[in-house]
Amino acid sequence: MSKKAFTLTNPESGVTSELPVVEGTVGTPAVDVSRINAEHGVFTYDPAFTATCSTQSDITYIDGAEGILLYRGYPVDQLAENSSFLEVAYLVLYGELPTTPQLDEFVGAITQHTMLNESLSKFFDGFHYDAHPMAMMTGIVGSLSAFYHDTTDIRDDGHREIFARRMIAKMPTIAAAAYKHSVGQPKMYPRNDLDYTSNFLHMLFAVPAETYEVDPIAAKALDVLFILHADHEQNASTSTVRMAGSTGTNPYAAIASGIAALWGPAHGGANEAVLNMLGEIGDISQVPRYLEKAKDKDDPFRLMGFGHRVYKNFDPRATIIRGYCHEVLQHLGIENHPLFELAMELERIALEDDYFKERKLYPNVDFYSGIIYQALGIPINMFTSMFAIARTVGWAAHWCEMQNDPAMRIARPRQIYTGSPKRSYTPIDQR
Ligand code: CMC
């Protein structure tokens, strides 16, 4: 049985209207306020969208109180345990787990799209050697729109599918090339005999002069990290992709806007910020001092990798990664490395601290992912690019979903104007 509509009465005009309640398959229902301006002459005000649903979506479900994350209905822990990243990518894009022939076809298509146009590869040379990889990725992915503009009809299902596959295939190549540029090494071409994650490690770490053996434990850990980062419903970067996509812009340009939004330290940039923070704390003896700084409202310092807008119990992705984190450190024989000891001590003390307990601030996905990336030898400034590779699946799926949504119109929020009321122009000699 559907929920009752909310009744809203305008205290000034006395006008009353019924606001319908919109319900999904599971989760919190929402009050449809789309006619509130027409019927009551007011807008709704919700800065940072803490209580606003921007869309209906079939892709991902999060229950923040219970620490649940489902992709197309499947719990993320089951997917991390049993699937490969590309199998999960298929699920997120198409809505169902693939059969063997479907998966083979998908993996084959992704593998065949991994190379970059040689002209595009030359774009990297225009960047200064110390350009941040996320800056390069924003630019390079945006420039894909120049390569695939005339051939991308956003109303054509087949073109949308090619876009999604191409984007997922090329992101590791672009990320690895950004890194190679920053260290002055030749870019490595993709190897189609390797799986998705192993190929990425090859493009990142191999050099033409030597043979490079991919560590299967490293590749597996990375594959799981990619699965856990594949989608997260209407987070800031996905909402940015949807916002840009709502204008009908070229989809590669929309993905570039998502990469830019992901870069910030409150979002995907947190994994890089965690390592920088651990470097700043420096030693276990300093943990209590930094916890006090994090609690001090006059100090801008925050404990990076802690807290989440939606998860107020625990981040299920963090629970899974925590296990892998210990496994990887053990496999590499570095569990006693001072940096990792410091991270574990920070985690232990923060979890016991009343400030963090009262505000339900737990380590999030970025706390442990940063530590694993560091253990695998991935450079700190590449951490957020790793997130971008994985989240490309979600961005592409959401962009495709919205293009088929009959409710899609240009996204255009309103504001409460707080500037000067209308006034007359003053000539410059009278100011
Ligand atoms: N360290 C210290 N205090 C914190 C932290 C933190 N990391 N996070 C939140 N708080 C405090 C905050 O000061 C506030 O306290 P009070 O109620 O006394 O004013 C309270 O907790 C609620 O925080 P908020 O800023 O209102 O929460 P939010 O939902 O707006 O922000 C967040 C969520 C993730 C941006 C924030 O927790 C944060 O900045 N964390 C550190 C950055 C980080 O790890 N980001 C990655 C998020 S997970 C991956 C992703 O989404 O990309």
Image (cartoon, rainbow, N blue to C red):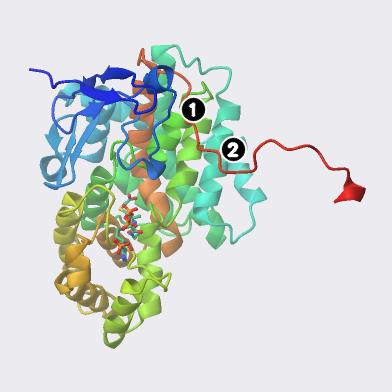
Which residue is located at x 37 percent, y 18 percent? 35
Q: Nearer the viewer, residue 196 or 249?
A: 249
Looking at the picture, how far across and down is residue 269, in whole percent?
Answer: 41, 56
Which quarter holds ligand 1? bottom left
Judge whether residue 189 can be spotted in this image: no
The dot on residue 255 is none
Mark earlier in primary sequence (1, 2): 2
Which residue is located at x 58 percent, y 57 percent? 131
The kind of secondary structure element at disc 1 is loop
Amino acid carrying mark 2 in the image: Leu
- Would residue 391 be found to the left or right of residue 419 on screen? left
Which residue is located at x 25 percent, y 61 percent? 368
Amino acid carrying mark 1 in the image: Arg
Judge whether residue 183 can be spotted in this image: yes
**Label 2 near label 1: C-beta < 8 Å?**
no
Pointer 2: residues within 10 angstroms few (<14), some, or many (20+)? some
Q: Nearer the viewer, residue 321 or 358?
A: 358
The residue singled out by tag 2 in the image is: 120
Q: Where 293 sits versus 261, above or below? A: below
Marks 1, 2: nearer the viewer: 1
Which residue is located at x 14 percent, y 73 percent? 352
The residue singled out by tag 1 in the image is: 412
The kind of secondary structure element at disc 2 is helix
Looking at the picture, how far across and down is residue 161, in whole percent?
Answer: 38, 20
